[in-house]
Amino acid sequence: MRAGCVCENGRLRAAFRGDLDRYVFIVQSQRGLAGPLAAFRVGLLSQGLWATTAYRLNHYARHRLRSRLFGVLPSVFHQVIMALTGIHIDASAHIGSGLKIPHGGRIEMGPVRVGRNCDIYQGVTLGASASTVSDPYSKPGVPALGDRVWVGPGAVIAGAVTVGDDASVGANSLLVRDVPPRGVVLGVPARLVSRRGSFSQVFYREMDNDDERKAALAADPETSPGQMP
């Protein structure tokens, strides 16, 4: 699992481009808009993009610049955007390029680790597990998500849970156990229901040429990569 966080490789501009292109690709595919027009529409209307941009600036200032003076404005900007959008991303989270939050709405993301080209939907909570009353086998800590993971609306991922590459977490699920690569989990608590992965849910430019995605698909010849919605 390679998060590719900007504090680890320093490529803040590349992360911005990766985030933006996830949204632009969908708009271009669904509406047939030209590149500049699609980018303008996305920048104007996509609260998820606002939230990830504010998070990345604040995170970069904290972990790369390491200056209180230069960190004030990014921190204030991040707080304002979180208040406007309801999308709360902890500045200590490590998030790979290409995060897409398709819809506005309450989202809570603690100091988690998230891989590249993931989708996080409205109402999702990713955070620490401080209590084991409901599940004595849950592990205190924070989640780590691999690449190309899809997390459906209302899902809760709590504790030191590892979600493998190309996994899918169903809407309104409560996940307190690890998920293998390509795993599909549903329910409260969430259980593994298949290994068909998130291939029909996560879309991004050049995905058909992504060697890691192709290798994951090849692991099960019966898995269909799906079509653009």
Image (cartoon, helix red, strand yellow):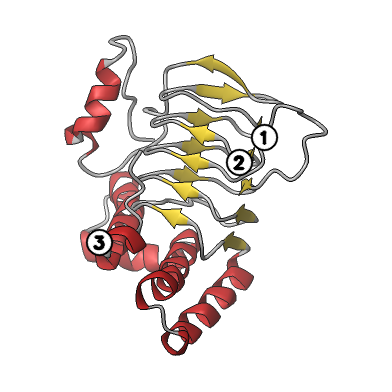
Instruction: Give yes or no for contact between labels 2 and 1 (Cβ–Cβ under 8 Å).
Output: yes
Q: Residue furthest top?
A: 222
Disc ID at residue 14: 3
Disc ID at residue 54: none
Q: CA distance from mark 2 to mark 1?
A: 6 Å
Disc ID at residue 153: 2
**Residue at horizontal 45 percent and vertical 90 percent from the top:** 69
Q: Is residue 71 above or below residue 30?
A: below
Disc ID at residue 172: 1
173 to the left or right of 99:
right
Q: CA distance from mark 3 to mark 1?
A: 32 Å
Q: CA distance from mark 2 to mark 3?
A: 28 Å
Q: Position of residue 75 (x, y in %)?
A: 52, 78
Mark 2 or mark 3, whichever is nearer to me? 3
Mark 3 or mark 1, whichever is nearer to me? 3
**Residue at horizontal 49 percent and vertical 65 percent from the top:** 51
Q: Residues within 10 Å of mark 2 (few under 14, many from 20)?
A: many
